[in-house]
Image (cartoon, grey):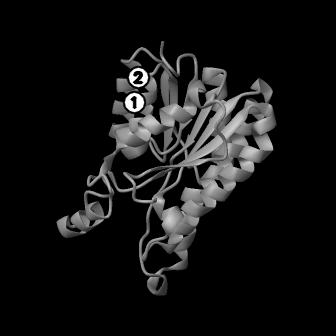
Amino acid sequence: MKLLENKTALITGAARGIGKQIALTFAQYGANIAFTDLKEDDEAKELEKTLLSMNVKAKFYASNAASFSDSEDTVKKIIEDFQSIDVLVNNAGITRDNLLLRMSESDWDSVLNVNLKSVFNLTKAVQPFMLKQRSGSIINISSVVGLEGNAGQSNYAAAKAGMLGFTKSVAKELGSRNIRCNAIAPGFIETEMTQVLAPEVREAWIKTIPLRRAGNAVDVANTAVYLASDISSYLTGQTISCDGGMHV
């Protein structure tokens, strides 16, 4: 039995990184995949092709998750194509790191818009459809930085911490309609974003992790499968730290 069979998942920011792995892992468990990113590029096309080869329905949508109208329009198109959205994974995110003293207003605004406002946009857009079907699982990809903060990332930490409060509030609002909302807080995960770090910085991070290794996108994707599936049917309003023990 495939845990996500007959479910349709919408994953934002999924052309690469953690979002891409979530799409691939969900497909392995039988989910149909609607995924978005800012523009259609070779990576998005290749992922769509790969997903279709896995015997699930899959389609890419070029969409700006930070835009309220764009998000609404995209969700309507997905409903037309797939007839339902059973799982929403709010994964779209960027970084614009700098010390607060040097951080520009545009760097603050862009990170809050992409990382936090997008969560409002997509959750609000899918809500009417999930209410009608009286079921749904919303998964917000936050960060250990949202739990602990990090120097040089006040914008990112604020956005990711905001996601956690949003998660709890939505869980309380929608729980009576069998719609669950949970968050995942990844720690040091091997992605394109972390590969640019200097070796000494990477080693310093890994020394702070009880499991003594960096995580990978599959670790996060497997956690998302749990939250998307009916196995976690009594879990809502929670944050799961997928971080090798960093936040204990």
Mark 1, Cα crowd under 10 Å, few <14 / some 14-19 / many 20+, is many
The disc label shown at residue 123, or none: none
Mark 2, Cα crowd under 10 Å, few <14 / some 14-19 / many 20+, is some
Q: Is residue 104 left or right of residue 126?
A: left
Q: Which residue does the numbered mark 1 point to in the structure image?
A: 24
Q: Can you see residue 105?
A: yes
Element at badge 2? helix
- As measured in the structure, the alpha-carbon distance from the residue carrying label 1 to the one carrying label 2 is 6 Å
Hey, what amino acid is under mark 2?
Answer: Gln
Q: Residue at x 57, y 26 (%)?
A: 231
Above or below residue 8? Residue 21 is below
Of 27 and 14, the residue lying toward us: 27
In the rendered image, residue 155, in percent from the top left (x then y), is placed at: 52, 71
Looking at this view, name the residue that lies furthest to the bottom. 101
Q: Residue at x 58, y 22 (%)?
A: 7
Q: Residue at x 68, y 55 (%)?
A: 166
